Image (tube, grey):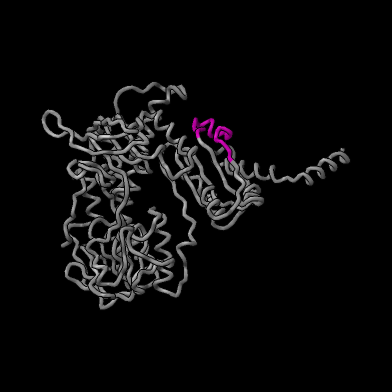
Amino acid sequence: MAEPLAHPMLPQDEHNERLIANVHPPDWVNPEPADKYHLVVVGAGTAGLVSAAGAAGLGAKVALVERELMGGDCLNVGCVPSKGVIRAARAWKEAATAAEHFGAPAITGEGDFGKAMRRMRRIRADISKVDGVQRFSDLGIDVFIGSGRFVAADAVEVAGHRLRFRRAVIATGARAAAPPIPGLAEVDYLTNETIFSLTEVPQKLAVIGAGPIGCEMAQSFARLGSQVTLIDMAPQVLIREDKDAAAVVQQAMVEDGVHLELGVKVLRVEQRKVEGGDGGAIVHLDRDGEEFEVAADQLLVAVGRAPNTNGLGLEAAGVEYGKRGVQVDDRLCTSNKRIYAAGDIASKYQFTHTADAQARIVLQNALFFGRAKSSALTIPWCTYTSPEIAHVGMYEKDATEQGLEVDTLTIPFDDVDRALLDGEDAGFLRVHLKKGTDQILGATMVAAHAGDMIGELCLAVTHNIGLSKIASVIHPYPTQGEVIKKIADLYRRGSLTPTVKKLFAWWFKIFS
């Protein structure tokens, strides 16, 4: 029988029962191991699943080991549930403002937070079949549910079985890390791993951390009815983004009711006492020497991640690791040439799509004679606030650090017809070009659907497609994606040199 989960998925309703039946079936019986595997994969998040499925599809004998939930963070406590909550929050906001913006019937009354969360859990359970134990077993993979541990340079033990391998992949991911805040360990607080278990909306929610997770959840819960306070030591939200891009999101969050406490230091946290028992937390803050506090019914901590290296027996395998995870070279090989690592356990880019791309590199390099490099990847990302911020390639500061001069073009979304018609005209598209050329070094888009639209620019950056070629592509009208065509046309108009302009002037003079 499968090892029990370290932490149950709450609430224990029909949807979570169905989820568990797919990704950690209690009655699963581990198979008898083969004499030797071409590939043993430890960890069944995105990197592990892609590695295992890809290798099995090529005909390799594969074992997949997972101690908790197949699908990893993305399915269970990350991408999937968060986007379900974000979509519900957006629907609530649209319903509340439809009368004002579009003359729709006025909506009054409270929403049903519990129903919104049930919908999320139902869809998550539906999706979980794709990442489930049975599907991967049906692919011909030996799936072992239990704690895998390296016991030699070429062997893993799990649930009393020894799995010998020619190659292995470490894909155990990362988890929410607790920052060194005095008193935090004594407080019942939420992380991304527990916030999606809520069945009632907190009246007051404090969020520590104004990075992507903190901002997404702060804005969503404000839209869903919480009084939200977002706390960070940085002077702005999303500190890694351009200041003006983050400012668009920050203003939208304020308009949604999020109270910001930025540029502050968290001194300590204590359990809040209310009549009848504990009731949330009190966060003690300092701004320029002045102390004050924020009281909340729930506290969400969204600061930092820690690699899942504990209990893996990496020393026995001769795999070097540290605070940031398993150490790998550019080909994702560890200090043990038989063992590779991919995903959050070995990457500073902790995104599902990065884990997927790195797993494909591992397949080339571990099973064949590939020389694929992780540094060659062009990795985009998106923060799913309203509006979203999506980015690919270099920021201007990156280009400066590399000694590259840039030309920068910006088109505001209030210059895009469809964005105006949709009432989604906050934001802009900005591209950085190698100076004097149409080569796109990087792009940032702030828009309602930036994550869906950035793909065209990802293609351009990855395959060195310049703005001149994009300008020659017919884009459908009216769409918000037309902004990319507009910025290409802006480049084309600006690329006319004085000499060319004089030639045109001469031509039209004689042509008349």
Residue 291: x percent and y percent? Answer: 28, 31
Q: In this view, does 101 lie above or below 418?
A: above
Question: Does 492 sit left or right of 420 as displayed?
Answer: right
Specify whether residue 412 is painted magenta. Answer: yes
Specify whether residue 427 is painted magenta. Answer: no
The foreground one among 243 and 36 is 243
Q: Is residue 402 above or below residue 411?
A: below
The foreground one among 110 and 302 is 302
- Does any portion of residue 140 appear in the rendered image? no
- Does any portion of residue 480 appear in the rendered image? yes
Residue 96 falls in image quadrant: top left
Residue 214: x percent and y percent? Answer: 34, 41
- Specify the farthest residue to the left: 276
Residue 212: x percent and y percent? Answer: 38, 43
- Placement of the C terminus among the 4 image quadrants: top right
Q: Residue at x 21, y 73 (%)?
A: 162
**Which residue range is magenta in the image?**
410-426
Residue 51 falls in image quadrant: bottom left
Q: Residue at x 28, y 75 (%)?
A: 153
Residue 429: x percent and y percent? Answer: 54, 41
Question: Does 324 sit left or right of 445 as displayed?
Answer: left
